[in-house]
Each structure stands twice: as C-alpha cells, then as structure tokens.
Amino acid sequence: MEIQWRKSTKSSSAEGNNCLELADVGGEILMRESDNPDVVIRTSRAKLRAFLGGAKAGEFDDLA
C-alpha cells in the first residue's frame, strides 16, 4: 500500500526541506518531516485535533 503524504503549501523554504507531511492510513494519522522521512509519528484524529486547536489558540507561539 502506497501512503499518500500531504503537506501545507506554507511548508516550504528555499531549500525545500521545511515540510511537515501528514497522511491518513487506516484511521491513524501519520506525520513525518520531509528531510527525515524514515521517522514516522502515529497519532489519532482526536489528538491531532486537540493539538491543532491549541496551535490555533496560540498556545505554542513561544516555540516558533
């Protein structure tokens, strides 16, 4: 089975290696960095939704 990775159009740099990629596989959400594709993080939709909600609310702005 081929995984269909997706990335944001905002995830790019001049070098093209500033990308976080996501995929939906069997109900799990997979994440990886484009410059280190062998390391994959698995999570659930609920956990990703909670993280994105916090990011949208500015909870992680001090890390950027």
Image (cartoon, grey):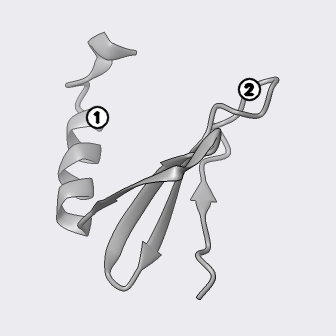
Numbered disc in front, either 2 or 1: 2
Q: Position of residue 14 (x, y in %)?
A: 82, 23
Q: Position of residue 23 (x, y in %)?
A: 49, 67
On the rendered structure, is 55 left or right of 35?
left
Q: Residue furthest top?
A: 62
Q: Rate crowding at label 2 as few (under 14), some (14 to 19) or many (20 or more) other CA atoms within 10 Å.
A: few
Q: Position of residue 35 (x, y in %)?
A: 64, 38
The answer to which image quadrant residue 15 occupies is top right
On the rendered structure, is 13 left or right of 21?
right
| Position of the N terminus by quadrant | bottom right
Q: Amino acid at mark 2?
A: Ser
Q: Amino acid at mark 1?
A: Ala
Task: Identify the residue position indicated by label 1 in the image.
Answer: 55
Residue shown at the point (28%, 34%) measured from the top left = 55
- Nearer to us in this view, 50 or 33: 33
Task: Identify the residue position indicated by label 2 in the image.
Answer: 13
Identify whether 18 is placed above or below 41.
above
Q: Earlier in the sequence, mark 2 or mark 1?
A: 2
- Nearer to us in this view, 2 or 62: 2
Residue shown at the point (60%, 65%) measured from the top left = 5
Q: Circle 1 — which element?
A: helix
